[in-house]
Each structure stands twice: as C-alpha cells, then as structure tokens.
Image (spheres, coloured by chain):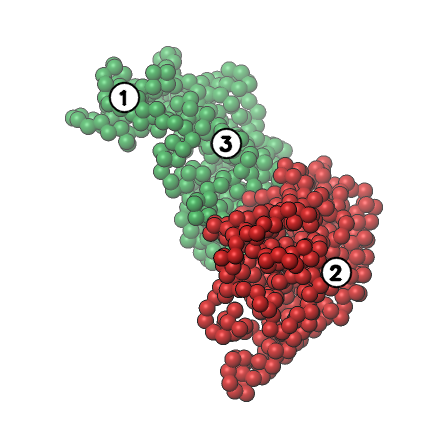
Chain colours: A red, B green
Amino acid sequence: MEPIYLDHAATTPMHPDVIKEMNHTMETTFGNPSSVHYFGRKARKYLDEARRVASNSIGANEKDIIFTSGGTEADNMALLGTALANKQKGNHIITTEIEHHATLHAIQYLEHQGFEVTYLPVNEMGQVIVEDVEKALTDETILVSIMMVNNETGAIQPIEQIGKLLQEHQAYFHTDAVQAYGLLSINVQQLGVDLLTTSSHKINGPKGIGFLYVKQGVHFEALHHGGEQERKRRPGTENIPAIVGFQKAIELAGAERNERTETYNYYKQLFVDSLQEAGIKFSVNSSKEVIPTIINISFPGTNVEALLMNFDLDGIAASSGSACTAGSVEASHVLSAMFGKGSERTLNSIRFSFGIANNEQQIKTAANRIAKVVNRLRK
Amino acid sequence: MTDNSNTRVVVGMSGGVDSSVTALLLKQQGYDVVGIFMKNWDDTDEFGVCTATEDFDDVVRVCNQLDIPYYAVNFEKQYWDKVFTYFLDEYKAGRTPNPDVMCNKEIKFKAFLEHALSLGADYVATGHYAQVREVDGRYEMLRGVDDNKDQTYFLNQLTSDVLAKVMFPLGHLPKKEVRRIANEHGLATATKKDSTGICFIGERNFKEFLSEYLPAQPGKMKTMTGEDKGQHEGLMYYTIGQRQGLGIGGPGDPWFVVGKDLEKNVLFVEQGYANDYLYSDGLIATDVNWINGAPTEAMVCTAKFRYRQKDSKVTVVPIDDNRVEVIFDERERAITPGQAVVFYDEEVCLGGATIDEIFKDKEKLNYVG
C-alpha cells in the first residue's frame, strides 16, 4: 500500500528544483563567505543573493534578515533577544495560549527569569481577539508575540490589526510566520511587525535553515557570541547550500502562490466532501479564515493515539497537536484553548495538511482509508 | 515455510533484550510485525528525565534495525486504577501483593491486547518465558523451557481465550540463547541489563517509595509469646519469612518475621530459619483462575507459592467459583498472603489464585494475616 503523506505542516519534501540548486552549490562552492579571497567571495555572492530574495519576499531590507537554523532558533532569538535587551523599559510580555512550543517555552523561560506574561485566550475558531490584546497592554509591556497562522488548526490571526494597535506603543511586535510564510502574502510594513520568523523546510526547502526578520532600530541582544556573521547577531559560518536551497524555495513559493492556494483549497474541499460521502461522523475545528493547507478534524468516539497508529498502518501519515512522547498523551494545548481543557475534541482530533507530495487521487484514496479506520475504531 | 506475511503480530516491547529478540524472531518468521511500547508509569524526575523515554529510545533503535513500525501507547490511567491501587490496598491490609500478576492480567493481556486487536492484530506477542499449545481448539500454557526463567507464575490469570491470541516466541529458548541471538544480530539492546524488581519502583529504595504513598506506622516487635523485641518501622515493610532489616541482635539463631497483628500494629518475630511458626500445611486462596476450566472435585497436582520456587505436591479442593482450598503433602515454609499460588500438571500451568488464609493442622493461623 502506497503511504499518503498528509503532514506537510510538520515538514515538506524538498522541491526537485531546490535539490538541483543545492547540489550545484555544493559541487561548485565551498568557500567561507567571510574569507577575503576568491573562494570566499564566490560563497558570499550566494549569501547576498539569498538575503536579497528573502528580504524581498516580506517587503523588508536586506540588513533586516538574520539567517538561523530554523523557526525554533528564530523564535528564541526574537523573544529572548528583545526581552533581555529591553528590560529597563518594562517587565511585561503578551502572547497567546495557542503559540508553537518554540514560542511558549521560550516565554516560559523568560517568566522564570522574572518577566510577567499574559497568555491571551482564543475564540472557538482559534483566533485571538484584537480587543484582548488592547486590554492586556500596559506601560510595562515590552513585547507582544502572536503567531500568524496556527500550526494545528491553520487559523489565521489578525496580525495586521494588532500591528496597527501597537503602532503607538513601545512594545515590539513579533510574529511566528512559519505556517503562513510562502502561502500568504506577507509585507512587514503593512503588517506592522518588528520581528518575524520563517522556516525553510515548511515550504519545500531544506531543513536546518530559516530566517528572523528584525526591523532596523529594534533593540536586540545576540544570544550567541563569536564571529561577525549576520552583523554579529548570529555568529557562525553560514550554511551556504541550505541558504541557497531556501532561496530557491522562496522563489518557487512566490511564483506559484496563486496556483498553490487554489490547488490546496480544492484538495481541502475534496477531502471534506469525500469524508462526508464515506458517511463518517466528524467535525472541522476552525473552519473560517484558515490557511488552505491545514485542516483539523475531530472524530467523535475515537482517540488520537489509536487513530494515528491505525492511520499509519493503513498508509496515512498525519499528526495531532497532542504531544506523544514515549506514550504520554498530552491534550493539544491549542484545542484546549479553543474548546476548554476537558473537551473530548482535544483528544480525538487530527491535523491533515496538504502539499506538493499530493495529487487529487491521493486525497480521495486517503479519505476512504481514513473512513475505514474511523468506522473500525468506533465499533 | 508458511506465508506469515498476512498475519499481523503486535509485540509488546519494553526496550529490554527479551522483547527485542521476540520481535526479531517473529520478523524472521515473516510475520507482519508491529512493535508497541507501553507506558504505564510516569517516573519523570526533577530534571525531566524519565526511564520510559530512555526505554522507548531503545525500542525505536531495535525496531529500526528490524525495519518494523513502532508506536508508544499510554496505559498510565489503567495501570494506576487496576494495578497500583490494588498494590497499595494489599499493603494497607498487611499483605504482600504481586503487581506483576495483576499487570499481566489487567494491562498486558487485556488493555494492551484490546489495543493491539484494534490495530488489526491477529496476535500479540511478548518476551515472556512461557509456551502456548493448542489442544483441540483449547489453548494451554506451558512452562518456559528455561527452568530458571519460567514466567508462568506471573501469567497464571490468563485464560484459554486470551492465549488463543498470544505468542510467546521465547518459551522454547534458554535465556543464554536469547542473549546470544541478540548479540549475533547486533541488536541495540543485546547487552542491556535485565530489569529487576517491580517496574514502577525500579532501582529505587522500596521503603522510600512506599512511604510516599502510605504513611508508615512504627510499632512493636514481639515474639509469639509476647516478649518485646524492639520497634518495627511499619508493618507494610515486612513480609513473612523475612530476615533482613529487623535489627535484633543477641545470641542464638537469626530472627525472622512470622506474622503481623494489623489491629495492634505488632510485628511477630521468631528465631531460626526453620522455626515452627513459619510452617503451614494448607491455605485458602481467592480470585482463582483456571486456564481451561475449573476441576469439579478435589484434584492432585503441583503448586508454586512463590516465583522460582520448586513445585510442591498439593491437593486442590474447589470451594466455590472464587475460592479453593489447597492442602500440602508436606509442610511449607513462609506462605505469604497476597502472593499467588499457581497450579501445574507436569509442564502445563493450570491456573492460579491469591493466597488469603493459611492453616496448620486445620487451624487458621491468624497471626499470618
């Protein structure tokens, strides 16, 4: 049985063109971009070009881009880097209950260091309410971090409105755009964000690379110390092949944005229709203002642990927001925030996410396999 | 060789060498093998380190070597409700429970079995040293061939219906051979130490562990004739026949625990390994399970009263659906309430029960429990 990959929000396969570019780079370039000789310059050219493409993709300046090892590092850098550098301005941070753990755990670390943190709730659609942000703001607030698209439900957050709200406030505004980047059009000026996180492997680029946008003038402390790279904000010899691969992925995502949006919206509708045709009971968590690639579905009368194992054995790769490490199932913190801690949806919901590994036939086949498992488990 | 590729076997994998070799052997026989790690207990320490995480890592490494899918399932709640609660209740009652017997009955061959079946499994397999034999559509459980490792004692609560869905691929192997196979195939767990003791206590100090859940009530130690022999630290810390940890000095033979008075919180001690108070000639056991049906009348067979003990000749007399009387051919030492008595006919394990009351010369030994 051919396994079907419906977990693109976890990671994506690399685009063939990305692999081609990376191979070419690895075969032809090995220099250290900091070196003052031919080999170094050749590598530096790649780096500069990638930085230009990255900054253009979000309407930023080249100097505002810091390449990192990925989303987690970029989030940590954004949060710890600004909180520590702006301690004298205040002690208060605002975030939401539905952030990725890269944000939540970094902020919890800051909380242990003495910062006051407000965790904003969300509504049943999984969205933060702008007024809640406004109410939470104080003179002490130095940082607001709210993700652009939730990784479990795909719910799009009102970043632009929050950006407007924060325009006149001292607090820096960070958004984790890992799930949005590549699919939603992003312009940092228009969004009014000061810091923005992206990751390459979610958009068909290689793993181990991402970038953090830091607006010029933001007080920011480096977490690592060493060389001069990335304007001393992220020292360490640059991973040129990965950066080039990321660049290619950014270019492809930009060129194909409309087409991808249309395709994945179609897949999502087809998926829901096929599940409905199969006659199983389910409901969609977060159905309005959601990114096309992600759908989060609750299957009443089942549980995540059994669902995921059965899906895998029947050729469906999906995931849940519930962390399962060595068999400990923790209810999804995102769905808990949406539906309440005891809600059974937090323990019977699965995230399916579409991408370049899929085609139309797969979506139909997947829905049939899923229906079979769900029917079996409900018995 | 028969084609086993359409037969799905879910292997309960602990991260130890036995279950690793179990999965290997089934894979070699061509079965559709799935490895599952059961997390029954959360022992995360203050540094976030948890032995289950490390054991699961070993499961992952072995499954990848064997190229089989692997998962983890969580039975912490079931384990707490069905095994740990029983464990504490028995200690509270002054008895010595056997959580492994209960874990096999309630978790491994019930909750886990059901879970495996929901994954489309035809069988579950574990690394227990025991064997299953089909006889005219009934399933018998035989001792493992390695006398020293035979685990039927802990499996006495299984039934023919359950055994129909169970494989014990190690039952015909000596432990040494299992290690050898693991080494030969370079399994990641080949040299891993066997786990000892009760799984949720692990390497920790038993007294310390128990005191976290049950308040210890120190009291008097007395001889059976009422002579004061000092203090005990709490009745739950002692089991019948125990010699260690009494701290009674003086001349003569060493001292042993012979009984408890729960009401007065007194621990009874007597001198000499072969002290008469330690001996009995019969018992009544409850929660009896017969793997292939109960005998209708008194039956002569052999029995074990403890793990790794030699069999003793007994007569089993059914009392009702739940209880049996067991009469020993010869007197037995240190029979302990709460432990299992398990019955055998030669190599076949017939079933077992929980020791409840103990007798000598038809008199109930009230001091034992």
Please indicate whether residue A276 sits to the left or right of residue A326 in the image: right
Q: Chain of mark 3?
A: B
> Pointer 3: what residue?
B83
Which residue is painted at 49% across and 57% down in the image?
A: A88
In the image, residue A351 sits, relative to residue A68, either above or below, namely above
> Pointer 1: what residue?
B221
In the image, residue B295 sits, relative to residue B21, either above or below, namely above
Give the residue type that dot 3 points to.
Val
Q: Which mark is residue B125?
A: none
Q: For the residues marked 2 and 3, what is the alpha-carbon distance in whole angstroms?
A: 46 Å
Q: Is residue B264 visible?
A: yes
Dot 1 falls on a residue whose secondary structure is: strand
Screen quadrant of the C terminus of chain A? top right
Dot 3 falls on a residue whose secondary structure is: helix
> Pointer 2: what residue?
A358
Q: Residue furthest bottom?
A: A38
Q: Chain of mark 1?
A: B
Disc 2 and disc 3 in contact, CB within 8 angstroms: no
Q: Nearer the viewer, residue A151 or B190?
A: A151
**Label 3 neighbourhood size at 10 Å, few (<14), some (14-19), many (20+)?**
many
Q: Chain of mark 2?
A: A
Give the residue type that dot 2 points to.
Asn
Q: How many marks?
A: 3
